[in-house]
Image (tube, helix red, strand yellow):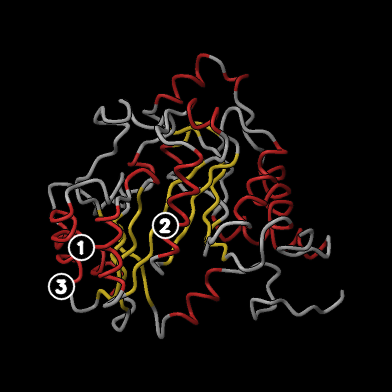
Amino acid sequence: MIQREFPWGSDKRYNDYSVYFKKRFEGKVQKISLDAGFTCPNRDGSRGVGGCTYCNNKSFSPEYCRLEKNITDQLLSGIGFFSAKYPTMRYLAYFQAYSNTYAPVEILRQSYEEALRHPDVIGLVIATRPDCLSEEVLDLLEDFSKRCYVSIELGVESFKEETLQRINRGHTVQDSIAAIHRIARRGIDNCIHLILGLPGDTDADFISYAETLSGLPVQSIKLHQLQIHKETRMAMEYRKNPAGFNLFEMEQYADLAVRFLEHLSPDIIVQRFVSSAPATMVIAPNWGLKNNEFVAKVEKLLAERDSWQGKLI
């Protein structure tokens, strides 16, 4: 096998988040997921009702994220879990559930400040939507970024208008593109979420999304294969018409991940390849594979094909 040098400074064949993370932070740093009680504009009627058809927040929220606990108590529970094994670990407060910039600015400020009062919390990770980033919210997050680490995780999910409409997303492709540029102009880190396999998206679309991302000021991405989760509108759609969904077999998705990487700018950091909902929440597909096991399959495929991120750009 030919030994290659890659521009991201490691021997991995893609720009791996764990490598970046170790360079960005000294010592061990862990994200602690939080539910601050926010909602979304496609749930409360301002953009729609019912939320995204695929969404069940319980599929990714840890057990300690319970609304009967305030932010401080959730942090203490999460930190307690990790600190027993890693006493010197530091933490990022990960506002994960729903849209965490969808509230009056003063409420947002109070929520973020509460998380940062813990002495071991060194930054904020804010999950939100492209249509929930007013200039006032970006002013607030830019102010926080001057005193601690801040990253905005932006749920884009698809770059196809018909697909966004079909999943009741409530924002447009142009909303996503504009939001990415506006975040970048503030000098705030970003992470873009995409779901591969949504109804209406095709194989050619998936590759075009890599090319679209490569032309935008994107710092990092999280990829998710489509999973049908219990207690969602999509689950009802799937039961009525399973033929309307083209769910990936594990080998298919590993192949797609490699081809996606080949068309993705080497400057973009890859945080995640797959969804990791609890098996009890998943209707299909359920591969019975841990995240690291899937990553190993992608790395094996890249090596077998002598391929790497950005090879076909």
Would residue 84 be seen by someone viewing this image from the given angle?
no
Whichever of labels 1 and 2 marks the residue nearer the N terminus, that label is: 1
Specify whether 41 is left or right of 313.
left
Name which quarter of the figure residue 106 lies in.
Answer: bottom left
Location of residue 211 in the rendering, given as x and y in whole percent from the top left corner: 67, 51
Taking depth in this image into account, of 105 and 16 the one nearest to the observer is: 105
User: How far is the residue under mark 3 from the one under mark 1?
Assistant: 9 Å
Residue beneath the point at 26% across and 56% down: 137
Location of residue 151 in the rendering, given as x and y in whole percent from the top left corner: 38, 64
The kind of residue on which mark 1 rests is Tyr
User: Under tag 3, what secondary structure?
Assistant: loop
User: Under tag 1, what secondary structure?
Assistant: helix
The residue at which mark 3 appears reads as 117
Q: Is residue 229 above or below residue 88?
A: above
Q: Nearer the viewer, mark 3 or mark 1?
A: 1
The kind of residue on which mark 2 rests is Arg
State the mark number for residue 112. Answer: 1
The kind of residue on which mark 3 rests is Arg
Q: Nearer the viewer, mark 3 or mark 2?
A: 2
Taking depth in this image into account, of 283 and 232 the one nearest to the observer is: 232
Location of residue 282 in the rendering, given as x and y in whole percent from the top left corner: 46, 36
Residue beneath the point at 71% across and 42% down: 252
Residue beneath the point at 62% across and 55% down: 294
User: Under tag 2, what secondary structure?
Assistant: helix
Q: Residues within 10 Å of mark 1 (few under 14, many from 20)?
A: many
